[in-house]
Image (tube, rainbow, N blue to C red):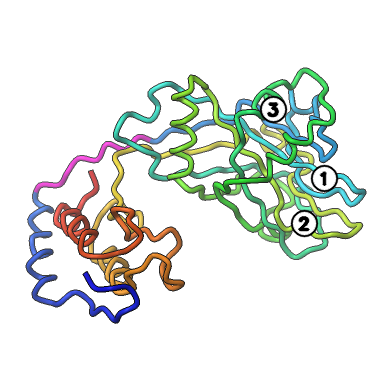
Amino acid sequence: MRAPNTIRPIFPRPRYAAVFGAAAIAIAAPLVRADTTVTLWASVQGLFTSYGQNNKNFNTGPGNYLCGYMGNGSAMRNYFVFNLTPGMIPAGQQVKSATFEIGTVFNHYQSLDPSETYALFHVNDSSYFDLLDVNTSIWLHYSTYNDLGDGIIYGSRELTPNAEPFQGIRYLPMTLDPAKVTNEMKLRLASGANNFAVGGHLTTISSGNYRQACFGFSGSDPSWGGPPKLTLIIGVPCPADLNGDSMVDDADFVQFASAYNLLDCADPAMPSNCPSDLNKDGVVDDSDFVIFAAAYNALLCP
């Protein structure tokens, strides 16, 4: 292995041909994929104000999930709870993709800014009681409000006034980090918990006296946007599938070769989270090449 920060050539052509030449053989005997698609609808949805207050009358139904700054010194963060089933993620499997979809209704974008960024955050175990206690008025629980917009980010997306309709209902998709979702769901299930919560926050709120909010007039009833949903694809991990198309082929090889030449995961040019570092040792080197070559010869993800 070469030392970091040295110039590394792309794989020599003879080596590439010898190691990857058997890929065509795999086409004749493809492996069977065992992916399962699971759709979870939010069982509880609501919001907390910056005063540490739950929006009790609406959290029970219709479940208003307004989020943002009201322009009067107060702000709101929303949350969504999804029920989990024991054994939902079998041993040796993981969430391979996670898509959160949130419904929009009229007047859901309320900001003078050309766009706002909405993000979903990890929720600490200590906040679950407040989120689920929708039948009791809660005040001054600042820690719960703060928790809904702090810590690990599962995913985010930009919202604009023109990208979503002002009439009719549409579900806006947001891609979540599957590794983070897998980790938290497995921890919750291992602890005996049967639910998984995410907190929503507009991360682009700036100081001012104008409203910066989204998802107003929302609710669990279909006529008000409907409950958000979380779609999971669960299966055997396939880390060498770098572009997520369930195959390890030439497209993945191009990405891997580029990372192999960079070597160090800390290199600014390396893709986020260093996906080609298949053994997670901080570098993309020959040990990762061996793993990638085996997956490339198999072609199809298990």
* Residue 299 x, y percent position in the rendering: 19, 54
Q: Are the two marked residues, 2 and 1, in contact with CB atoms closer than 8 angstroms?
A: yes
User: Which residue is depicted at the point 79% across and 30% down?
Assistant: 54
What secondary structure prevails in the magenta region? Answer: loop
Residue at image mark 1: 75
Structural crowding at the residue carrying mark 1, measured as other residues with C-alpha within 10 Å and reported as few (<14), some (14–19) or many (≥20):
many
What amino acid is labelled 2 in the image?
Answer: Ile
* Residue 289 x, y percent position in the rendering: 21, 62
The reply to whether the magenta stretch includes residue 35 is yes
What amino acid is labelled 3 in the image?
Answer: Leu
Between the residue at mark 2 and the residue at mark 3, the CA separation in whole angstroms equals 23 Å
Which quadrant is the N terminus positioned in?
Answer: bottom left
Q: Quick check: 108 above or below 37?
A: below
User: Which residue is depicted at the point 24% across and 73% down?
Assistant: 2
Which picture quadrant has residue 271?
A: bottom left
Residue positioned most to the front: 3
Between the residue at mark 2 and the residue at mark 1, the CA separation in whole angstroms equals 10 Å
Q: Which residues are magenta?
A: 29-36
Residue at image mark 2: 205
